[in-house]
Image (cartoon, rainbow, N blue to C red):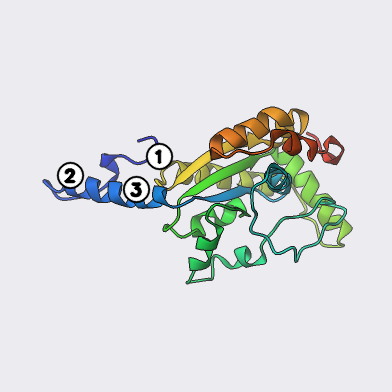
């Protein structure tokens, strides 16, 4: 189906197909009756903070705590919620209901930890892996943290992770995904802002979204 779900995805006994399908449709209607949780995701250093800043400028409410302050690597802020980092360990994730109708940043490695009780609209930021690795290495170097001896194993790990998580997302009935490319957003922010507005079906301020994109922060190019 349009949401990656079909009758053939269920292992049921003969004669029960219609019952199961009707149950799925009821669950789907319940998801759709509540405002979605808007998730900005992607690998670290892939432009997720920029996307959050654009949504904020457009008039969308964010779920953030501002514990991580702006610095040289993200001079306009990180727009994070510290509690998101504990999604893998937390058993009670009902607090995410408070983010319905708002945007929250969740790195792609934690998307599978989101509870199934919500409907999610995911803005997935993609970036050339060489740029991601270069940006991460510069951040680690500035912080005096050790760098990986070679980029190749990390690049392979990221590439496989992206393949797995995107295949998983495509099969989730309560996830809708908009893919954006970081370099394209920086160079042409207006089409990206319009794509966000249309995908979310929100009355976002396109001009303000465009104005907060700073091409000077595109410092690691492949």
Residue 73 relative to residue 20: left or right: right
- At label 2, counting other C-alpha atoms closer than 10 Å, the crowd grade (few under 14, some 14-19, many 20 or more) is few
Examine the rendered structure and indicate whether residue 193 appears above or below residue 78. above
- At label 1, counting other C-alpha atoms closer than 10 Å, the crowd grade (few under 14, some 14-19, many 20 or more) is some
Could you say where residue 3 lies in the image, as x and y percent from the top left? 40, 39
Q: Quadrant of residue 220?
A: top right
* Residue 194 in view (yes/no): yes
Examine the rendered structure and indicate whether residue 50 appears above or below residue 194. below
User: Along the polypeptide, which appears first: circle 2 or circle 1?
Assistant: 1
Could you say where residue 99 lies in the image, as x and y percent from the top left? 56, 58
Q: Quadrant of residue 132?
A: top right
User: Along the polypeptide, which appears first: circle 1 or circle 3?
Assistant: 1
The residue tagged 3 is 29
Query: How far apart are the alpha carbons under marks 2 and 1?
Result: 18 Å
The residue tagged 2 is 18
Residue 194 relative to residue 89: left or right: right
Q: Quadrant of the C terminus?
A: top right
Q: Nearer the viewer, residue 136 or 78?
A: 78
Query: How far apart are the alpha carbons under marks 1 and 3?
Result: 13 Å
Q: Nearer the viewer, residue 212 or 84?
A: 212
Q: Quadrant of residue 214?
A: top right
> Which residue is depicted at the point 45% across and 51% down?
119
Could you say where residue 11 lies in the image, as x and y percent from the top left? 23, 49
Q: SS class of the residue under badge 3?
A: helix
Could you say where residue 190 lies in the image, as x and y percent from the top left? 71, 29
Question: Depth-wise, is mark 2 or mark 3 nearer the camera?
Answer: 3
Q: Nearer the viewer, residue 146 or 210?
A: 210
The residue tagged 1 is 3
């Amino acid at each position: 189906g349009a949401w990656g779900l079909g009758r053939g995805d269920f292992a049921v006994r003969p004669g029960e197909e219609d019952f199961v399908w009707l149950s799925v449709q009821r669950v789907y209607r319940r998801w759709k009756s509540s405002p979605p949780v808007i998730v900005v995701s992607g690998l670290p250093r892939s432009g997720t903070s920029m996307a959050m800043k654009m949504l904020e400028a457009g008039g969308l409410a964010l779920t953030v705590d501002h514990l991580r302050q702006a610095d040289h690597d993200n001079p306009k802020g990180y727009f994070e919620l510290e509690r998101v980092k504990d999604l893998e360990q937390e058993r009670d994730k009902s607090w995410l209901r408070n983010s319905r109708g708002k945007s929250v940043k969740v790195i792609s490695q934690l998307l599978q930890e989101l509870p199934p009780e919500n409907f999610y609209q995911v803005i997935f930021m993609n970036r050339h892996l060489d740029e991601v690795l270069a940006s991460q290495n510069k951040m680690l170097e500035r912080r005096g943290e050790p760098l990986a001896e070679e980029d190749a194993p990390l690049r392979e790990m990221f590439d496989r992770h992206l393949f797995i998580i995107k295949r998983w997302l495509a099969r989730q009935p309560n996830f809708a995904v908009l893919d954006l490319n970081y370099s394209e957003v920086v160079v042409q922010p207006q089409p990206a802002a319009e794509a966000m507005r249309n995908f979310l079906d929100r009355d976002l301020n396109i001009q303000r979204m465009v104005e907060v994109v700073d091409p000077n922060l595109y410092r690691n190019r492949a």
